[in-house]
Each structure stands twice: as structure tokens, then as C-alpha cells.
Image (tube, grey):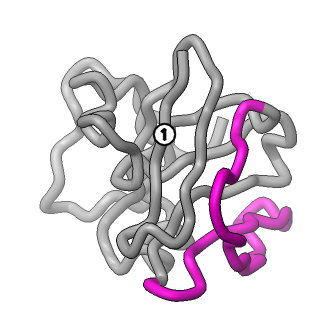
């Protein structure tokens, strides 16, 4: 199956060849700072399945609580966050669901797991049915 996506201005596009993805929210402070929101919404896919098809994203390396690098990729023109490659998950990429085309930002209507729930703002309730992880893994 092919999933596609882009940044807000369309300068960066990508395609993902994967049968499925893990739908995940991350409430860590790094994700909060990166998005300016309470969490990131992610389609976690094999790293080798993600191909940029137009443009060249910029990246920013942040050091996570693990001491490992979180490499954030974003559009140099509009600033849209596109995906993150975590050193602690070298074979996977966390694609930002809001950049997916065709309604996939909905993550198939289900969140499978929430990470860093210890950092989730108190005004947000856990997603019903989602596995709750205090930190990563």
C-alpha cells in the first residue's frame, strides 16, 4: 500500500510503501516543543519505506531524555514538521499524521499507543483503548 503526504506549501512531498503503520501519540516535552501543542500524532513506519519525492527537507537534531538524538525533518519554506527519526528506533520513522494525504491524518480512526503519558497535559484524557506508556518503550 502507498501512503503519500506533503508539507503545507507542497514544496516537500513523500511516499510510504507499507502494508500498515502503528498509530501513536507522543506527549514528550520534545514533541510538545516541536509542535507547539500537547502531543504529536504519528504513523510509525519502517524507515526504509519513506521516500521524499519532491524537495529537500531541513532537519534539526534534538537530544531526547534517553540521551539519544531525535532528528526532526521539516519544510524549509513553510516550516511544516514532516517526520522524525529517533536514534532509539533506528529502523522506524515517525511520520507526522497531519501531513498525510487522503484523510490518513485520522490514523484509521484509532490510536494504538500513547507515549510519554507522564508528560501529557492534565486537561487531556487517555485515548480509550490505546496502550499507555509512561515513557518510550
**Quadrant the C terminus occupies:** top right
Residue in the image at 57% along x and 11% along y: 19
Residue at the (66%, 51%) spot, across then down = 53
In this view of the protein, which residue sits in the foreground, 46 or 8? 8
Count residues near mark 1 (Cα–Cα under 10 Å), then give few for <14, some for 14-19, many for 20+. some
What residue sits 17% from the left and 54% below the top? 124
Provide residue 127's location: percent of width, then percent of height.
23, 33
Which quadrant would residue 9 be assigned to in this image?
Answer: bottom left
Please count the marks in the image: 1
Q: Is residue 65 magenta?
A: yes
Q: Quadrant of the N terminus?
A: top right
Residue 97 horizontal side relative to residue 43, left or right? left
Q: Is residue 34 left or right of residue 106?
A: right
> Which is nearer the eye, 131 or 108?
108
Q: Which residues are magenta?
A: 49-78
Q: Nearer the viewer, residue 132 or 51?
A: 51
On the image, the x and y values in percent for residue 101 come to 35, 42
On the picture, is 135 further left or further right than 124? right
Q: Which residue is mark 1?
A: 4
Instruction: Measuring from the top left, give residue 59's x and y in whole percent.
Output: 72, 76
Give SS at disc 1. Answer: strand
The question of residue 71 being in magenta is answered with yes
Give the residue displayed 56% in from the left and 77% down from the top.
75
Q: Position of residue 118 (x, y in %)?
A: 43, 54
Amino acid at each position: 500500500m502507498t501512503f503519500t503526504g506533503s508539507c503545507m506549501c507542497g514544496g516537500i512531498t513523500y511516499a510510504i510503501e507499507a502494508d500498515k503503520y502503528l498509530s501513536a501519540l507522543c506527549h514528550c516535552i520534545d514533541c510538545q516543543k516541536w509542535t507547539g501543542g500537547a502531543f504529536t500524532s504519528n504513523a510509525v513506519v519502517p524507515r526504509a519505506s519513506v521516500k521524499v519525492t519532491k524537495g529537500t527537507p531541513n532537519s534539526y537534531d534534538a537530544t531526547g531524555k534517553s540521551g539519544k538524538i531525535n532528528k526532526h525533518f521539516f519544510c524549509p519554506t513553510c516550516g511544516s514538521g514532516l517526520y522524525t527519526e529517533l536514534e532509539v528506533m533506528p529502523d522506524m520513522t515517525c511520520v507526522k499524521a497531519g501531513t498525510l494525504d487522503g484523510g490518513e491524518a485520522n490514523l484509521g480512526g484509532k490510536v494504538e499507543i500513547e507515549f510519554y503519558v507522564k508528560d501529557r497535559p492534565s486537561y487531556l484524557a487517555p485515548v480509550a483503548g490505546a496502550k499507555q506508556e509512561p515513557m518510550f518503550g
